[in-house]
Image (cartoon, rainbow, N blue to C red):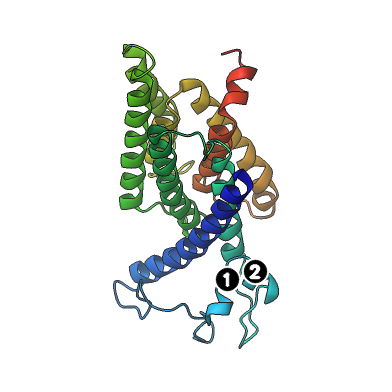
């Protein structure tokens, strides 16, 4: 049952990754074209080079990209790596989150938290794709992520009340967690006048902090995000000193890692 559940989550995540990558591109085209674009949000996918309308077998997540070697079936021009990275990224994120719940023994509250976390992951996935591709974090998706994060915190608090009495710490921890992740990026943005981080990173950090609801996990997430950014972007920055680092994707990846291995990190720090 667990293997079937994780397999379905992997497939679902890959499908969302493909969909979000397509919608991110369409949103960017709409914004850059000031609303004048042929790419509607409900339109069939086409090749950006030759306008070839993709068939259903060209849109199978991960498999189609590999089978076509990352090229358009008609014009043979490269599609790019954004699609395969998005599909694999969301698939692995859904798979990782699936290990945090037992589909057989989970109660209604645990399912509610899990489904809301998946909704947050979808929103975060879109932000990571868009920021990684275009260096921007759309405001409405940041707001959606914060709403999902608040709902997760509320559900976790509600679940905790069934096993223990209310404590002010239950409210303070999510706020402190959000203040750490969101506050640090806000300070960096203000001090550097937007040169070190973007104006949306602190809102993204706030959403992640609220969802983690733990100052310690927020610190770990911050550490992992910066380590990943340094490891991945160091060679790129070395070649082009004017290259900017977009932290959105690294923050989202670090969040998924921390959330998945939360129990391990708590054990490691003696909590």
**Label placed on residue 60:** 1
Q: Could you tell me residue 124's position as x and y percent?
A: 44, 48
- Nearer-the-camera pick, 243 or 145: 145
Q: Could you tell me residue 171's position as x and y percent?
A: 32, 19
Q: Which image quarter holds the C terminus?
A: top right
Residue at coordinates 61% horizontally, 56% vertically from top-left?
A: 88
Left or right of 66: which side holds 41?
left
Q: Separation of disc 2 and disc 1 at Cα?
A: 6 Å
Res 64 quadrant in image: bottom right
| Residue 232, visible in the rendered structure | yes
Residue at coordinates 38% horizontally, 77% vertically from top-left?
A: 43
- Contact, mark 2 vs mark 1 (Cβ under 8 Å): yes
Residue at coordinates 37% horizontally, 25% vertically from top-left?
A: 159
Disc 2, SS: helix
Residue under circle 2? 63
Q: Could you tell me residue 137's position as x and y percent?
A: 40, 51
| Residue 186, visible in the rendered structure | no
Left or right of 21: which side holds 85?
right
């Amino acid at each position: 049952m667990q293997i079937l559940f994780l397999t379905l989550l992997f497939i679902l995540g890959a499908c969302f990754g493909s969909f979000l990558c397509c919608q991110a591109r369409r949103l960017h085209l709409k914004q850059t074209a000031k609303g004048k674009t042929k790419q509607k949000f409900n339109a069939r996918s086409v090749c950006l080079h030759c306008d070839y309308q993709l068939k259903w077998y060209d849109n199978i997540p991960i498999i189609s990209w590999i089978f076509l070697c990352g090229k358009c079936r008609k014009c043979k021009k490269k599609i790019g790596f954004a699609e395969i990275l998005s599909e694999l990224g969301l698939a692995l994120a859904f798979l990782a989150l699936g290990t945090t719940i037992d589909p057989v023994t989970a109660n209604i509250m645990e399912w509610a938290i899990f489904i809301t976390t998946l909704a947050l992951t979808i929103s975060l996935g879109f932000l990571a794709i868009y920021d990684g591709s275009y260096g921007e974090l759309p405001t409405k998706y940041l707001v959606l992520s914060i709403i999902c994060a608040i709902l997760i915190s509320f559900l976790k608090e509600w679940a905790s009340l069934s096993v223990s009495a209310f404590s002010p710490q239950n409210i303070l921890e999510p706020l402190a967690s959000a203040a750490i992740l969101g506050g640090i990026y806000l300070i960096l943005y203000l001090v550097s006048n937007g040169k070190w981080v973007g104006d949306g990173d602190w809102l993204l950090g706030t959403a992640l902090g609220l969802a983690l609801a733990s100052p310690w996990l927020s610190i770990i997430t911050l550490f992992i995000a910066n380590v990943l950014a340094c490891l991945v972007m160091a060679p790129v920055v070395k070649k082009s000193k004017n290259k900017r680092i977009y932290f959105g994707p690294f923050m989202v990846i670090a969040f998924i890692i921390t959330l998945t291995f939360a129990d391990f990190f708590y054990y490691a720090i003696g909590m």
